[in-house]
Image (spheres, grey):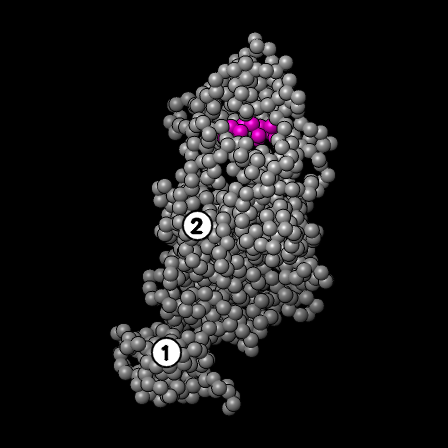
Amino acid sequence: MPAVKGAEPARVRHAEGFTQLPGGGWGLQERAGRLQVHLPQGASAVTFVLPEDGPVLLAPPGYQVRIIAAVAGGLVHEVIPPEGTETVDLQFAAVPGQTSRLQVGPIGVKPLPRGGVDGLGVSAAQLAGRFRLQAAGDPNGSSGETSGGATPPGDAGASADQPAADPALAWVRFFGGGNGHRTGLSQFGAQGLALLGVGYRDILVHYFPGTRLEKRVSDTAQRVRVGLSLDEQGIGNSAPVPRLLWKVEVPEGTTVAGASTRPVPPGVYAITYNTGSTASGSAGGTGTGGTGSGSTANLPPGFVFDPQGNTPGEPFVVAGTKPSPSATTEKIELIPPPGQVLVLHYPYTGCDPKKNHAYQGCRRYEGRLEFETAPVTGGTGIVVRNILNLQQYLNGVVPHEMPASWGKEALKAQTVAARTFAARQNFGLDQNLVDSTYDQVFYGRYEDGTPTGVYEKKIAGVVQATDGQVLTYNGNLAAVFYSSANGGWIASNTEAFGDGTGTPLAYLTGREDRFQLADGTMVTPESYWYGNKKYEATYFRWQRDIAVSVVEQKWPEIGRLQSIEVVKRSPTWTVLEVQITGSAGSKVVTGRQLRSALGLPSTMLLPDKLYPRVFYDVPMDSPLGPEINRAFQLNLISGDVYANFKPAENLTRAAFVKMLVNAVETSRGVPLAGPDEDPATEDEPFSDVHPEQALYVYVVKAFKAGWIQGYDAQTFGYDLPIKRQEAAAVIARALKLQSAPAPFDDVPSTSAFAGAIGAVYQAEIMRGYPGGTKFGPGQTMNRGEAAAAAALRSYGFCVANGC
């Protein structure tokens, strides 16, 4: 993937599950991995390219994820962490059945323009006027901001005839849930149930209803054959990948078995295949590049063992055996003594004995290594498979598919799923079972890096506790699928991997993910508050901001984007078909095509209709729709997880102050003074304002800036609804407006609020009722009015005039 233009190379402080690739990118070698990126002073965002079929980004709460551009084969991601963040934590996960390119990066950092995350220096009128889409209306039948479709009092008057959206300004915000295909076992759901004391048997019955848990094999007796599938770039493949040269370290007592058997002295060897038809170093020859201890020219055909570094001895050849007389391939097996391992320097990095984790290139394999010839460009290559017992295999698989720190019962459920998956592949004995995310991640013997091996022992105990157990249905091995999170709704296998039609497997039906505990309480395994236990899965709910230009680039036949509408979904919120409408026409795509093209975590989308980042309950053709939604685009306001804003609801004084603080801070590009660390310094004098309140910081900032005064009884009225005259007074102080006469019949000149009301009217911040003669000073301001006045128009005034 290319580097992002305009970004400076980033310093990755820590990498887990990744190997750095030539050219500066990163290769994911686990089911999930992490990159911790240093954010230098002056930088505000981390940016990188993800392939369309690449891993999914998992951003921590508080991070904003935006897809700002499309490049050949990938999407440019921009991650904006909370203010003051020095190390940006980026987590990535490979989605089974969806992720085929395990690449990220290169990683860059860049500043964001002054004036907010959209970097726009335009007036409020421009902001509202340049953002207008032809909407199909509220799917629930509401025709305005208030119930019953009534026009709200005050601040009405936004034009209903605006130009089309400017792709440079507009975004589509997607809300969704879950990560991956969402069918079968939810890994985060299993962990949530384990934390509540639910056993692995009940977890498996819940996610695979109707299946049976049976012991069919002995883990120590069952043989497994795993193909090593990472290529020279560290990228996984669906089949073992041949290479011209492999480098392996063998312990004392190792033997090699082929057409004959011989001992291999301890040391490091480069293993190649010599056809005997070319000279050393050319196609078909040994080609060690002179790094070995002696010449490999004129050696007979076979597998060449060339001692490397300080390993003594001369190169030697071992002839392979053919699986059948007519076979064109040959094999040998490298066999260490019992209890010892073979160390493969793989995929291309040096093997650092102090860094035994798989992604450091130091792979330690129990059992045997099988080397088999395979044709490659430039000569005869070799594929490698690890032959070991099932217990050894699962000890290596389980901690790479689920964190070893998670609950034992969740890990047991994962172990049974992993064993069943391998059994359906006949353990790789007569078909491919590879070590990458295409099947199950396996990088040899698991080593946790702790002094006592605490997690190694934990995983070994989990595997032994479920020895030989698999899931069956009607006597056959069950098709066991698992993904990270389902968002509270389990997708059927036909929804996850098809078009939702047809009959799903009886144990993979779509349904709400609800579990009944022993006391009768129903919980959602991925998100609950039960007693004093609170839990929510990463990506139980998520959002993505996609630039309109990206959507238009992906489907250029639609012209200028106007709307995105779900036209077919399943009862599990799984999107099956989406209609993308633009100025030149419409395009219907499947939910899986949409997810892949736009890099979404799953096909579970919550609203049915999406417009370039607008609220579900604020149509663009409603009186304040363009302004409210523009404030949303600028991150001045936010809604709930279902993309609703509830514009007709009353607004509290604290929530109003938050909107205004956001507007001023975003326009200035610097924060207002907040609570002092010194507890002896008074942050605010109000008896009803406390640090544990959600909006405490915003109230303190407004008080320190001199915007609010409170009531005579030294209270602020934190939860009281704000009146329009109070809102005018606070805005006038915040924007430093000059007092002016109020031109309204219901605002006498003797009113204490008259000057402020006149000031905000003259600055075009607040307006009157339709007709313009009434202001309604004592009426409560609703959320829609505040979004337009306190958020968007105040922001526009500050950008134009300074605050």
Residue 321 occupies which quadrant of the picture?
bottom left
Q: Residues within 10 Å of mark 1 (few under 14, many from 20)?
A: many
Say which quadrant the C terminus sits in: top left
User: In this rendering, would 315 be left or right of 461?
Assistant: left
User: In this rendering, would 504 be left or right of 603?
Assistant: right
Q: Residues within 10 Å of mark 2 (few under 14, many from 20)?
A: many
Residue 313, can we see it?
A: yes
Query: Is 478 inside the magenta-drawn segment?
Result: no
Residue type at numbered disc 2: Thr
Q: Residue at x 44, y 69 (%)?
A: 231
Residue 154 badge:
none
Mark 2, secondary structure of its residue:
strand
Say which quadrant the N terminus sits in: bottom left
Where are the magenta residues, as a range?
782-795
Q: Residue furthest bottom?
A: 325
Instruction: Identify whether 240 is placed above or below 705.
Output: below
Question: Which residue is more in the foreground, 350 or 99?
Answer: 99
Residue type at numbered disc 1: Ile
Q: Residue at x 62, y 21 (%)?
A: 768
Which residue carries the number 1 mark?
Answer: 271
Residue 47 badge:
2
Question: Which residue is more in the foreground, 138 or 62?
Answer: 138
In x, y percent, where is residue 281? 32, 80
Question: Which residue is more in the foreground, 179 or 476?
Answer: 179
Instruction: Identify whether 283 is placed above or below 497.
Output: below
